[in-house]
Amino acid sequence: MAIKLIQVPVIIGQGSKQTLVVSKLRISPPSPPVFRINNIDTEVIITNMKVIPGKVIINGYIDKNINYKTLEHLAV
């Protein structure tokens, strides 16, 4: 996990926080059933950041690229 540093005129605090994001992903038909997930590439994109007294508010999203093998490839 990469840490992104920001510079502010006065340091009012320091720390880190992690949030576990759990979600279910549905592969819609007509895609064949998933046999195995090969890898998942994830990138966190920060769209806006605001520093207010006592807080840093960060808005963004997570971009995931999931590479998987289907049962269709096993039948060959």
Image (cartoon, rainbow, N blue to C red):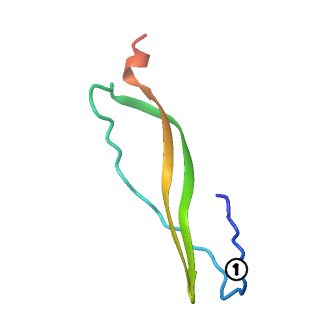
Residue nearest the viewer, comparing 60 with 64? 60
Where residue 39 sits: x, y (%)?
Answer: 54, 38
Q: Which residue is mark 1?
A: 8
What residue is shown at x 40% (from left), y 25% (from top)? Answer: 70
State which quarter of the image contains the C terminus: top left
Side (left or right) of 32 relative to 18: left
Q: Residue at x 55, y 56 (%)?
A: 45
The residue under the point 50% across, 61% down is: 60
- 26 over 57 or under it: above or below: above
Residue at figure coordinates x 50%, y 48% from the top left: 63
**Residue furthest top as drawn:** 76
Residue 58 locus on image (x, y percent):
53, 70
Residue 52, placed above or below residue 31: below
Nearest the camera: 75 or 46? 46
- Left/right placement of residue 49 relative to residue 10 reads left
Toward the left, the furthest residue is 29
Q: How many marks?
A: 1
- The image quadrant where one finds the N terminus is bottom right
Residue 40 at x, y percent in the picture: 53, 42
Name above or below for residue 65 compared with residue 33: below
Q: How many C-alpha atoms fall within 10 Å of the one at disc 1: few (<14), some, or many (≥20)?
A: few
Residue 54: which quarter of the image? bottom right
In what element is the residue under mark 1?
A: loop
Decide: is 39 above or below 71: below
Residue type at mark 1 is: Val
